[in-house]
Amino acid sequence: TQLLEQSPQFLSIQEGENLTVYCNSSSVFSSLQWYRQEPGEGPVLLVTVVTGGEVKKLKRLTFQFGDARKDSSLHITAAQPGDTGLYLCAGATDKLIFGTGTRLQVFP
Amino acid sequence: DAGVTQSPTHLIKTRGQQVTLRCSPISGHKSVSWYQQVLGQGPQFIFQYYEKEERGRGNFPDRFSARQFPNYSSELNVNALLLGDSALYLCASSPYGASYNEQFFGPGTRLTVL
């Protein structure tokens, strides 16, 4: 069974702080996607990383795919209340395998 | 443009009953996938349909079935409901044939089994 473990499970921080979310697996994925899900809505794609070692930046969000394509991280700089939500990584095999999720709460 | 729509929004059923959930994909998208999201967990893949044919199936019992119509809308059926079937059921559409490509999710149907 392929599993994607995310850590931490919960994160509660003040506006302006930096944070990193980790997504780890023992399996190799052809690509990895990061989604954000807000209450009452479905997940929305943030980014797809494809190449081992790849780094992608989306404004204050930096995504990295591990060299072995088994793990990934999401770093948020100067978090804002609008960043609050459930962050999900999803690894691509013959289907999408979603991680366990990291629930982020950013307080003003 | 309208996003993925799902109906109903919420549903309450009792054990042993049957339920049908509906999904309309984004216009032009021919792939529809269904996911189950239990509270506190990430979504789990149930089915993918592309051009009206089943392309993939997750590790779910035969009580779960789905189909896709000529207009690419889809239905998910669950028979003999169990308490453990309580979850948010997400539908996702994509213009691509593979279920591992970018998915555009609907808001989900919240199913509660009593």
Image: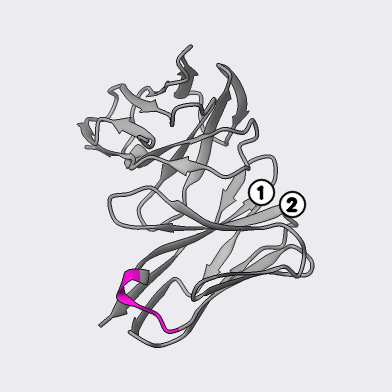
The quadrant in which residue B19 appears is: top left
| Residue A87 magenta-highlighted | no
- Does B27 appear above or below A53? above
Give the CA distance from mark 2 to mark 1.
6 Å
- Disc 2: which residue: A30
Look at the numbered disc 2 and give the secondary structure of its residue: loop
* Disc on the earlier residue, 2 or 1: 2
Crowdedness near tag 2: few (<14), some (14–19) or many (≥20) residues, C-alpha within 10 Å = some
Question: Which stretch is magenta?
Answer: A78-82
Residue at the spot x=40%, y=80% of the render? A79
Residue at the spot x=32%, y=41% of the render? B86
Q: Residue A92 carries which label?
A: 1
Look at the numbered disc 1 and give the secondary structure of its residue: strand
Q: Nearer the viewer, residue A51 or B43?
A: A51
Amino acid residing under circle 2: Ser
Residue B49 place in picture, x, y as percent: 55, 24
The answer to whether the residue labelled 2 contacts the one labelled 1, judged by CB atoms less than 8 Å apart, is yes
The quadrant in which residue A29 appears is: bottom right
